[in-house]
Amino acid sequence: MDAAEQHLLAETLRKTMTTASGRALDAALTDLGWAELLAEQPDIAVPLTFRLLGETGAHAPLLNDVLLSAAGRPTGGTLPLPFTGGAWVVWERDDASAGTALDAELPLHTVPVGAPVPLAAGRVALGWWLLGTGRAMLTLARQHAVDRVQFGRPLASFQAVRHRLAETLVALDGAEATLVAANDELGALLAKAAAGKAALTAARHCQQVLGGIGFTAEHDLHRHVRRAMVLDGLLGSARELTREAGALLRAGGSAPRLVHL
């Protein structure tokens, strides 16, 4: 797939995600050939689709497909997913179970301990989703800083605001670099941890930039913050994965080269 085809695909996916979510988006992506694209070109399908889910705020149970495909099983179903704190959840493909304690929009509910599944591909997919969510929050905060006037000056002219936005951008760009470089189990683990930490950093800084309006139900920020917290918990939180990576490095006695410069 060349650059022009990827651009056309991205525009099609973005348009679809801005008009549908949940079960409706799942069906629309199936019609667009999501399963075939995932099977034939996962290196394009996963980063593009999951990043756009984050940027648009839409959701669909595509994480199931990524993990099922990585395990060599047919897509279109569900499977238990490890969640932070030792819990397990299922991401249903039916909106009827949405609105649980985990998230008001996502059809997630807890289940008994499930069978182990390969997690690397799912962690990378969630990393891209977290990255898109973080960039969506940064866009909202940046636009507010540009539009808002305080004490007779644009909010964006204050150094403290600029620093928060800059730190968010650096965290997100760093996470993207780790996602691009992730090509094995450890790389996927570190990429998910970096993306989770970056998204939570974005939530914290962007909330501060937006101030009181960022807490209101009328503003979109709270939806992205909730989404970032749930996605960070899936397949291991940033805190848990960082500790796991440290344990692996201690056990191995050395740190492997992740990127060849």
Image (cartoon, rainbow, N blue to C red):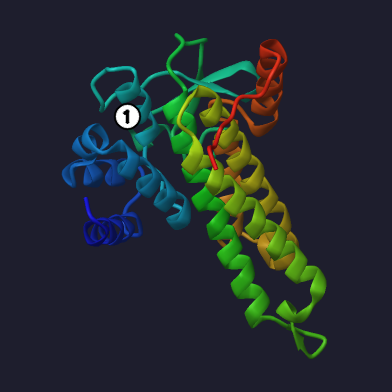
- Drawn side of residue 22 relative to residue 81, left or right: left
- Drawn side of residue 204 relative to residue 79, left or right: right
Q: Residue at x 69, y 11 (%)?
A: 251
Q: In the image, residue 15 lies at what x, y percent? A: 30, 61
> Label 1 belongs to which residue?
65
Q: Residue at x 73, y 66 (%)?
A: 209
Q: Quadrant of residue 189?
A: top right
- Taking depth in this image into account, of 174 and 87 the one nearest to the observer is 174
Q: In the image, residue 227 lies at what x, y percent? A: 55, 44
Label count reads 1
Q: In the image, residue 27 lies at what x, y percent? A: 23, 42
- Taking depth in this image into account, of 172 and 28 the one nearest to the observer is 172
- The residue furthest front is 261
Q: Quadrant of residue 10?
A: bottom left
Q: What amino acid is labelled 1 in the image?
A: Asp
- Drawn side of residue 225 relative to residue 159, left or right: left
Q: In the image, residue 9 lies at what x, y percent? A: 25, 56
Query: Judging from the image, what secondary structure is the residue with disc 1 in?
Result: helix
Does residue 59 lie above or below 62 as drawn? below
Q: Does residue 227 appear in this view?
A: no
- Taking depth in this image into account, of 66 and 87 the one nearest to the observer is 66
- Drawn side of residue 51 relative to residue 87, left or right: left
Label 1 environment density (alpha carbons within 10 Å; few <14, some 14–19, many ≥20)? many
- The residue furthest bottom is 152
- Taking depth in this image into account, of 134 and 4 the one nearest to the observer is 4
Placement of the C terminus among the 4 image quadrants? top right
Q: Does residue 201 appear in this view?
A: yes
